[in-house]
Image (tube, rainbow, N blue to C red):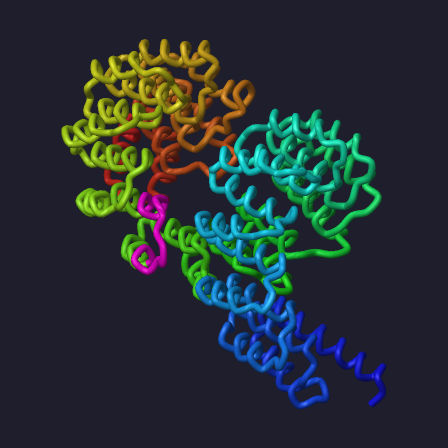
Amino acid sequence: MSESSHRVEQDHFAVLLRQCGTSKKLSEGRRVHAQILESVHRHNRYLANLVVEMYGRCGSVEDSKAAFDRIPQPNLFSWNIMIQVYTRNGYFEQALETFTQMPVQNTIAWNSMISAYADNGNLIQAQEIFEKMKNKNDVSWTIIITAYASTGHFEKANNLFQQMAEVTVVSCTAMIQAYILNGHLNKAKFLFDKMQEKNILTFTTMLVAYAETGHLEQAKFIFDAMPYRDVVTWTAMIDGYAQNGNLTEAKKLFESAPVWNVITWTAILTASTKSGHLDAAEEMFKNMPEKNNVSWNAMLASYVTVSNIRKAKGIFDMMPEPDVVARTSMIQAYADAGDLDSAKIIFDQIEDPTFVTWTVMLQAYARNMLLEQARIMFEKMPFRDTGAWNSMIAAYAHSGHINESQKLFNQMPRWDLVTWNIIVAGLGRNGNFEEALSMFYEMPERDTISWNVLLTIFVQAGALAKAEKTFATMFDHDLVSWNAMLAAYAQNGHPRKAVEVFLELNLRGAIPDSVAFLSLLTVCNHLGLITRSIQLFSSMHHDFGVIQSQEHYACIVDVIGRCGELQNAKDVIHSMPCKPNLEAWGAMLGASTVQRDSLLGGCAATKVLEFDTSQATSYVMLSNALQV
């Protein structure tokens, strides 16, 4: 075999080894290694180094060490690769031992050790190695400064930066990142302005910082000032506009970019989906020359968000290799649609579910009150955060199993404000008012939700005076607070006070929702205010953008019908955008009975009985209506 043929075969093996390492295909890597050992390249140190690296990337440290030991004369690359294999896989003692055994410890090896300990959070060991290092370079300083800054030790990072005999573009950029990471944007800009020389990473770092904090004008100023821009910079600026909801500018910039890559396409695609422009997103997705998993997942997530399970499944089925993110999205889609069997099938197909996947499946069971399955999922979770505990506690509380809810609350390693709110609300909902109050006053901190929980407890208990006092002492009122007081007055026979609350709600700038309108329509019904009820019902959608529900229609039918306007009440039923439900026809039947209209009463009663033949009351009301 000629020398050129040897070189071609060597390069072929090198490509295969790198591919196996990147894709973590251990069995395929072993097969390629076996072929190398049977070829003329069995003593090729270049390929031997790649074999060590490949096994390390695949997580097989033993194979990596065995391959390293077979190298007759390891060079510096061999030693550095072996150290990186150990550090990448968490074998820090072996990495340090290998480091000390090196014939010559070069800068790369020193930096690898500093980086390994820093990445593992062992800053003391990282600092010790850094201090022992005689010939520190930019990379060394950057690693240790970044390590301290990223773990909240900003002052230490700043002190190290000040100790540098000569700062460079690399170290200054690292310090700018440290300032930004710790919320010192002005200091970052000050250092940026002082720099006589900047590279593209420096510019991009400042640009992203401004964009992420919503300072789009400053971000665009940095962008325009750049002497040259690469695809990363263009993507960062497009993404900045997109993430801040400025889809128009994002599209303009996208169209003017000299070159696009899959990340640029995905940035504008994600912006379109998040802003609700699904038609534009679909067209863009179709036109993408190349798609990665992020692109597929962005499109999939957009369909899940709008509960379009058909299109979500279509995208999922077309994905070349659905990853755990895609499968988690489909679990969410099926869970939202109430198809928990399909959600569980997808979950079981995932070899290594992420924490998010576990949580989505747990919450799916919990929301549907499937407590046994939820508890099994909860117990199987490899790690439980506060959110998982809260989901399980809430599921028990909402389903009336308050004792189980309290048991889990007492077993929980750490409570947050959400946990306290869940348990207090659960106790109140289940009628344990005294215990709920006791827990409320034990809370280490409270927010508006906490006070709303207390307010709701008083409303449920019929303690109107205490509800009024609580509402008056609250620092902040949200819509839940206003709705609670509306319900309190409506349920306790104070309709005019409920109207006053509704008017004040509007004066304070709060926008009433469907719950508020339902309470007020009920109040107007009790007062016989037919004109006011019709005005409110009409204003819901026209003035406030609130879509009338079946409950709102039933209420207005009852109001109009009881005032003798039976034909108008019937017209309202027939104008409903969806099929009238039991409540609507029940309201019509009640009004017909009061007005002793046998024709409309008979029609309404028949419709009621179509929903539920066990409604004995309907027969009585029907009989009353017919006895005119």
Q: Residue at x 75, y 27 (%)?
A: 221
Q: Is residue 604 magenta?
A: no
- Please state the horizontal and vertical placement of residue 460, each as a whole percent of the image: 23, 26
Q: Nearer the viewer, residue 41 or 333?
A: 41
Q: In this view, does 413 lie to the left or right of 295?
A: left
Quadrant where the C terminus sits is top left
Q: Is the magenta stretch mostly helix, strand or loop?
A: helix
Q: Is residue 75 above or below residue 294?
A: below
Q: How many labels does the image show?
A: 0
Q: Residue at x 68, y 28 (%)?
A: 216
Q: Which of 212 and 188 is in front in this view?
A: 188
- Please state the horizontal and vertical placement of residue 61, each as a whole percent of the image: 50, 72
Furthest residue to the left?
434
- Please state the horizontal and vertical placement of residue 242, each as a whole percent of the image: 67, 36
Q: Give the range drawn in magenta.
A: 377-391
- Please state the horizontal and vertical placement of residue 102, each as a whole percent of the image: 56, 68
Q: Is residue 380 magenta?
A: yes
Q: In this view, does 420 lie to the left or right of 81?
A: left
Residue 38 shows in the view: yes
Residue 272 falls in image quadrant? top right
Residue 456 falls in image quadrant? top left
Q: Nearer the viewer, residue 458 or 527?
A: 458
Quadrant where the N terminus sits is bottom right
Furthest residue to the front?
134
Residue 277 shows in the view: no
Q: Is residue 231 above or below residue 628?
A: below
Q: Nearer the viewer, residue 416 or 576?
A: 416
Residue 602 falls in image quadrant? top left
